[in-house]
Image (cartoon, grey):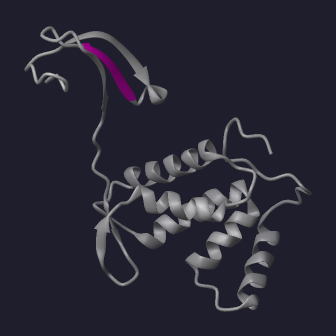
């Protein structure tokens, strides 16, 4: 690896550790020419499938769009960035595990709604209202009625998709 400080062609690894729950390798390096030290991070570069949009367009899977939709649904709800990261990772895993070269946006939206339904009913309805393009209050009411029929009575508790999340 080239030194980012002096441009020397070769550096040596002085320490290696796992990071990001074992998905990333962190290497501490030193340049023999200028003695500068720096970190590099190594992770698998997995190609995710393209997304087929409602209008037929195809575009690369964009984790930032996925995260943005989930963040908007969970806005002002009792969930932090780490919780959102777990939901994003779960959906990204489902996209990758599909084995498809192209995945319809509709299927990704359904996976997000399944995850949100298990985590937070309000976030689920928020996401569904945009995803399913609710036209009026009647659409909201119908979705809430379906949600009430599908879920057991939890009172104020929410179901948790997250292993260590406590409501």
Depicted 13 relative to depicted 139: above or below = above
Depicted 47 relative to depicted 9: above or below = below
Q: Residue at x 59, y 59 (%)?
A: 71
Quarter where residue 119 is shown: bottom right
Q: Residue at x 30, y 78 (%)?
A: 57
Q: Which residues are drawn in magenta?
A: 24-29
Depicted 106 relative to depicted 89: above or below = below
Magenta stretch holds residue 25? yes
Please tell me how many numbered marks the rendered image carries: 0
The percent position of residue 113, horizontal first and vertical second, equals 61, 65
Q: Residue at x 9, y 19 (%)?
A: 8
Quarter the C terminus occupies? top right
The percent position of residue 148, horizontal first and vertical second, equals 82, 70
- Which one is in front, 73 or 131? 73
- Which one is in front, 63 or 99? 63
Depicted 96 relative to depicted 57: above or below = above
- Which one is in front, 6 or 96? 6
């Amino acid at each position: 690896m080239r030194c980012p400080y002096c441009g020397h062609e070769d550096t040596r690894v002085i320490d290696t550790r796992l990071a990001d729950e074992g998905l990333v390798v962190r290497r501490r390096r030193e340049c023999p020419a200028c003695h500068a030290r720096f970190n590099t991070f190594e992770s698998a570069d997995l190609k995710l499938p393209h997304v087929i949009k409602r209008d037929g367009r195809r575009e690369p899977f964009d984790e930032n769009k996925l995260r943005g939709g989930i963040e908007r649904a969970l806005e002002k709800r009792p969930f932090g960035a780490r919780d959102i990261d777990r939901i994003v990772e779960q959906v990204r895993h489902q996209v990758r595990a599909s084995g498809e070269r192209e995945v319809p946006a509709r299927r990704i939206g359904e996976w997000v709604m399944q995850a949100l339904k298990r985590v937070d009913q309000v976030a689920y309805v928020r996401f569904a209202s945009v995803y399913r393009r609710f036209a009026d209050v009647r659409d909201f009411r119908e979705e809430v009625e379906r949600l009430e029929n599908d879920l057991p009575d939890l009172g104020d508790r929410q179901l948790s998709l997250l292993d260590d999340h406590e409501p």
